[in-house]
Image (cartoon, rainbow, N blue to C red):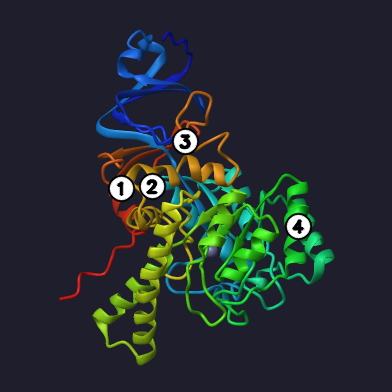
């Protein structure tokens, strides 16, 4: 290989994982030219490179991999137990500041791209503007604006309530006008107090109007689905991603529906299971239990959630066995799960049956493909944006190595991520093991 360059950076490390799922390259190098990846190969491929024109960075014992792509974030959230019902009470200016804090934590943890899954009004669009203006730092953002919902439906108070096909189409057009990259829809209720978690919300004609209008503009769609009927309605409407993908009946009981899962596969829709956000609530309750006795309601909640987590893990295992397209999307900062902790969701997918390498794919190339940015990022390959992280250890052997991010490059620029202790403040730890 012969490489010509002007102002280039050569990154050398023990291993390179390109994000496509094949085995790691040993003794590897990546050549960057400005914001773009110019070439990848083994160290010897770059032997002849003129040293005075190339900055060489050597990382012994480390792995080069693509920056993580989190397909499901809530940048205005807190991850301290506050719900959407609490967030909507805060002024937009405060929400944008919180979003900036979260964006920095996510980027510094190694998440170089994130798909925002819905916030009040167009607050996250202001965050993106602030990032573009250089006021704050954050991942490259894929934005939706307020999730489209029924009156009183899940997250409807963020500004996306519609009734009927005409209003549904109008809301999509408004979001597109404001700069939305995709359209998020709540096909069932959720944690929103006035919604009904296990019942579908928008009707199929409304859902179809939304996806049809979005697809007309070349925009992807994703539906929040806490029930089987919500999944079925979304598939009828030809949605591109099923979020949560919970197989619940109207009474809250769970039954895995292989026929519905097969339909997801036939239609080629992606699935974002969001396992850890449930576990984070369990962790929060266990931590509370360390300091005081739980109320009877909390105790019930803890037992329910533990039971439900096992069901969710088992259902996700089945989806993995069926070979469906499953991606990492953390759902942080929602509930008790803080942004900056994306690897927990990938770990949960590995617990559900992914190999560590499949876990990596779910948080790099497949994640990028699922949110429409796979042409640009998610793999390390000549011509792609140089969104790269350097990790201590080998995450294809042990997925927990995703926590050991030592350097982050966004568009070829190495970030100053502040002190380790400041980064550690964004980290959430599991509760201590019970005696
Ligand atoms: Zn969410």
Name the residue furthest left. 435
- Estimate the x, y position of residue 337 in percent, counting from the top left: 42, 65
- Residue tagged 1: 399
N-term-proximal mark, 2 vs 1: 2
Whether residues under marks 2 and 1 lie with C-beta atoms below 8 angstroms apart, the answer is yes
- Residue tagged 3: 387
In three-dimensional space, the C-alpha distance between marks 2 and 3, rounded to whole angstroms, equals: 18 Å
Q: Quadrant of residue 54?
A: top left
Which circle marks residue 359 in the picture? 2
In three-dimensional space, the C-alpha distance between marks 3 and 1, rounded to whole angstroms, equals: 19 Å
Whether residues under marks 4 and 2 lie with C-beta atoms below 8 angstroms apart, the answer is no
Q: Quadrant of residue 64?
A: top left
Whether residues under marks 3 and 1 lie with C-beta atoms below 8 angstroms apart, the answer is no
Image quarter in which the N terminus is found:
top left
Looking at the image, is mark 3 or mark 4 nearer the viewer? 4
Q: Quadrant of residue 164?
A: bottom right
Q: Residue at x 48, y 79 (%)?
A: 253
Looking at the image, is mark 2 or mark 3 nearer the viewer? 2
In three-dimensional space, the C-alpha distance between marks 4 and 2, rounded to whole angstroms, equals: 33 Å
Image quarter in which the C terminus is found:
bottom left
| Crowd rating for badge 1 (residues with CA inside 10 Å; few <14, some 14–19, many 20+) | many
Which circle marks residue 172 in the picture? 4
Q: Residue at x 41, y 69 (%)?
A: 278
Name the residue furthest front. 259
Q: Is residue 370 left or right of residue 351?
A: right
N-term-proximal mark, 3 vs 4: 4
- Estimate the x, y position of residue 223 in percent, counting from the top left: 62, 61
N-term-proximal mark, 3 vs 1: 3
């Amino acid at each position: 290989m012969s490489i010509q360059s002007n102002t280039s950076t050569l990154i050398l490390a023990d291993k390179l994982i390109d994000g496509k799922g094949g085995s790691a390259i040993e003794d590897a190098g990546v050549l960057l030219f400005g914001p773009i990846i110019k070439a990848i190969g083994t160290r010897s491929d770059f032997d002849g490179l003129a040293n005075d024109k190339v900055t060489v960075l050597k990382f012994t014992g480390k792995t080069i991999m693509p920056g993580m792509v989190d397909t499901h974030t809530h940048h205005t959230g807190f991850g301290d137990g506050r719900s959407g019902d609490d967030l909507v009470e805060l002024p937009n200016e405060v929400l944008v500041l919180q979003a900036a804090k979260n964006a920095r934590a996510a980027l510094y943890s190694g998440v170089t791209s994130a798909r925002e899954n819905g916030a009040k009004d167009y607050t996250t669009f202001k965050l993106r503007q602030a990032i573009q203006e250089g006021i704050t730092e954050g991942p490259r953002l894929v934005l939706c604006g307020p999730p489209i919902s029924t009156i009183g439906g899940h997250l409807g108070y963020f500004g996306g309530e519609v009734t009927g096909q005409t209003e549904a189409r109008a809301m999509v057009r408004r979001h597109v006008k404001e700069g939305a990259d995709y359209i998020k829809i709540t096909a069932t209720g959720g944690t929103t107090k006035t919604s009904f978690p296990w019942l579908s919300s928008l009707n199929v004609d409304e859902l179809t109007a939304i996806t049809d209008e979005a697809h007309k503009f070349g925009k992807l769609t994703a539906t929040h689905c806490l029930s089987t009927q919500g999944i079925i309605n979304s598939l009828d409407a030809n949605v591109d991603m099923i979020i949560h993908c919970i197989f619940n009946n109207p009474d809250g009981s769970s039954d895995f529906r292989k026929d519905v899962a097969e339909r997801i596969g036939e239609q080629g829709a992606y699935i974002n299971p969001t396992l850890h956000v449930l576990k984070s609530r369990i962790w929060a309750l266990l931590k509370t239990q360390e300091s005081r006795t739980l109320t009877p309601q909390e105790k019930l909640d803890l037992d329910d959630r533990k039971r439900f987590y096992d069901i969710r893990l088992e259902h996700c295992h089945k989806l993995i066995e069926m070979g469906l397209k499953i991606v990492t999307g953390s759902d942080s900062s929602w509930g008790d799960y803080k942004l900056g902790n994306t690897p927990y969701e990938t770990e949960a997918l590995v617990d559900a049956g992914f190999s560590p390498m499949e876990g990596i794919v779910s948080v790099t190339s497949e994640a990028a493909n699922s949110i429409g940015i796979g042409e640009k990022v998610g793999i390390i390959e000549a011509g792609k944006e140089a969104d790269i992280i350097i990790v201590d250890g080998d995450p294809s052997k042990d997925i927990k190595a995703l926590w050991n991010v030592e350097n982050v490059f966004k568009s070829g620029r190495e970030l100053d991520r502040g002190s380790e202790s400041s980064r550690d403040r964004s980290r959430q730890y599991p509760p201590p093991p019970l005696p």
